[in-house]
Image (spheres, rainbow, N blue to C red):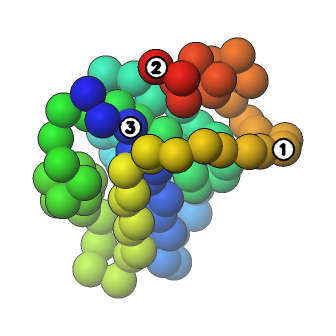
Amino acid sequence: MSKYLVTYDLVGTSETSEDYKRLIKKIKSYPDWGKVQKSVWLIKSSNTATAVRDDLWSYMDSNDRLFIIKVTGTAAWRNEICERSWLKDFLNS
């Protein structure tokens, strides 16, 4: 299973909107996920980056922004939202 970094901007939408709730629910449907920053998540999927993009894009509007990248290297961080132990386990799995 591949690890992906997912980041997005829902343009003109508040974080309490139904659009955000639907997108976050979809992100949380992946086998493993964690919220790293405000609009930055890590997920695991057996799909390609393109397939993940297309899957998540179906929950977004045409003026929104979405970036998916496969995580393959080392990482460093500060002040993450998720639990540090989860993040280390995720990256080392």
Q: Secondary structure at mark 2?
A: loop
- Give the CA separation, mark 1 to mark 3: 20 Å
Look at 66% across and 52% down and name the residue there. 38
Q: Are marks 3 and 2 in contact (CB under 8 Å)?
A: yes
Residue at the spot of label 3: 3
Farthest residue toward the front?
A: 73
Q: Quadrant of the N terminus?
A: top left
Look at 63% across and 27% down and name the residue there. 87
Picture coordinates of residue 68, whole percent (x, y): 37, 59
Picture coordinates of residue 14, whole percent (x, y): 57, 63
89 vs 33: above or below: above
In the rendered structure, which amino acid carries the disc numbered 1?
A: Arg
Q: Secondary structure at mark 1?
A: loop
In the rendered structure, which amino acid carries the disc numbered 3?
A: Lys
Instruction: Pick whichever of labels 1 and 3 is earlier in the sequence.
Output: 3
**Which label was assigned to residue 93?**
2
**Which label was assigned to residue 78?**
1
